[in-house]
Amino acid sequence: MDYTSLSCSEFVQALSSKAPVPGGGGTSALVGALGTALGNMVGSLTVGKKKYADVEEEMQGLKASCDRLQTELLQLVQRDAEVFEPLAAAYGMPKSTEEERMQKEKVMESALLGACEVPLQIMEKCCEAVLLLEQFAGKGSVLAVSDAGVGAALCRSAIQGASLNVFINTKAMKDRKKADELNRRADDLLERFVPMADEIFRQVADRLR
């Protein structure tokens, strides 16, 4: 099933069911795409306005970056569901003999790694979006600055949400060296970009109050 082709109500219904996908990872990607699109909206309301002629070219470039990120994040909604399939299959493998146990462990490690890489990609894309939203909030139309703040809040949530999907999978990995490496990647993104998104939100809120 292509989850990106569902209506809003269909996606929410699928999310609330007992089906394992879509889940937190795909939802984080979708939320990140929405946050990115809000920044893009600010850009759309800025370009072509005489008042913002001095940032016209910059806004066009930011919008092009948003177009790319929106597409990539929507693709990751679907990709997150796809990488869960081999993981679910691995959990169901027999382990009654030593040979079966070793084979299951090998398949599990590979599936867990794949299930970590997608949420890490979601985090990275949302961090890129935060950098763009910082520019939209600072240089875009003042009439839409609240949308830049909302976009930052959404991308912040998406980064944090995707990180939990990294951590739940690294926790199950036998290769602790690789798990620690993946955790460090996620922690680094959290430490750098969650405060940045918070600061964008705070600055926008201060301008509105």
Image (cartoon, rainbow, N blue to C red):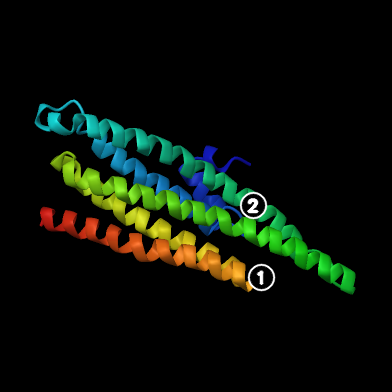
Quarter occupied by the C terminus? bottom left
Residue at point 18%, 54% (across, down): 204
The residue singled out by tag 2 in the image is 83
Q: Amino acid at mark 1?
A: Asp
Residue 114 falls in image quadrant: bottom right
Please give left or right for residue 170 compared with residue 39 in the image: right
Q: Where, quadrant-wise, is the N terminus in this rendering?
A: top right
Q: Is residue 67 left or right of residue 101?
A: left
Kind of residue indicated by mark 2: Val
Residue 71 visible somewhere in the drawing:
yes
Q: In front: 139, or 156?
A: 139
- Residue 22: image tag: none
Q: Nearer the viewer, residue 62 or 27?
A: 62
What residue is shown with label 1?
175
Between discs 2 and 1, the one toward the N terminus: 2
Q: Residues within 10 Å of mark 2 (few under 14, many from 20)?
A: some
Q: CA distance from mark 2 to mark 1?
A: 19 Å
Q: Where does residue 94 sit, x and y in percent of width and height? A: 84, 67
